[in-house]
Image (cartoon, grey):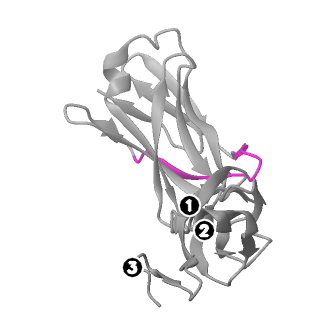
Amino acid sequence: QPDGNGGTTDQGGTSSQETKIELEPEHLEIEEGKGDELKAIVTPSDKVSGLKWEIEDESIVSVSTSGDGRATVTALSVGTTEITVKTDDNKSATAQVTVTPKKHVVTVATVKTGEADNKVPIQGVVVTMKDKVTGSIYTAEYKPDTKGYQANCPAGNYTVTCSAKTGFTIEGVPSQDIIVNPNGTVDSSANFTMNLNSISINTNNITSLSVK
């Protein structure tokens, strides 16, 4: 008979609570080569020790468990799969896991002269990388310690573009294609020289331009 707590009570007075399980989060996004955690919330709590974890596609992620309802998910390759956790009485919950491409810190422009401390022209330039396949856009930030513009992006074919903020003008057509390799190196076939007032900046595959 019902016990008022979501379970039943047998004729001997022993209470049997209905098993419930949830998996948090229900959607997980992990960069390739990195890891994150899933947590199974189980009622009653004594069902945690008997959990069984299943992976739809073991080539995309791996799972290691600690026996307390937590699982560390490691991203192996790009793709989407599902992870299901089951109790010993076959109650289950599922999470979708998406593995995104590994990102690399890529230098797309470096200041070549000793005038990198002149922040006015540097701050007037925006350097972006657009993935030619997915359309994703990554912005390269100026790093004073390296005196260059760096972007955090996955391997792929990109069009690098320089644009001017309000109050600045760029001469020429400041864009060209580059390739970021899976190991993070950048293929180059031409030089890119930007003249920002008296500052000369050099990077890959972009024609000359100036900001004034």
- Distance, label 3 to label 2, CA atoms, is 37 Å
The residue where tag 1 is placed is 29
Q: Which badge, 1 or 3, comes first in the chain's sequence?
A: 3
Q: Is residue 93 left or right of residue 72?
A: left
Q: In the rendered image, is residue 179 in sight?
A: no
141 shown above or below 138: above
Which numbered tag is attached to residue 125?
Answer: none
Q: Is residue 130 left or right of residue 59?
A: left
- Residue contact between numbered discs 1 and 3, judged by CB atoms under 8 Å: no
- The image position of residue 21, as x and y in percent, is 55, 73
- Residue contact between numbered discs 2 and 1, judged by CB atoms under 8 Å: yes
Question: In front: 17, or 115?
Answer: 17
Tell me, yes or no, whether the highlighted magenta stretch contains residue 176.
Answer: yes
The residue where tag 2 is placed is 97
Of the two numbered discs 1 and 3 in the rendering, the one whose residue sits closer to the viewer: 3
Q: Which badge, 2 or 1, comes first in the chain's sequence?
A: 1
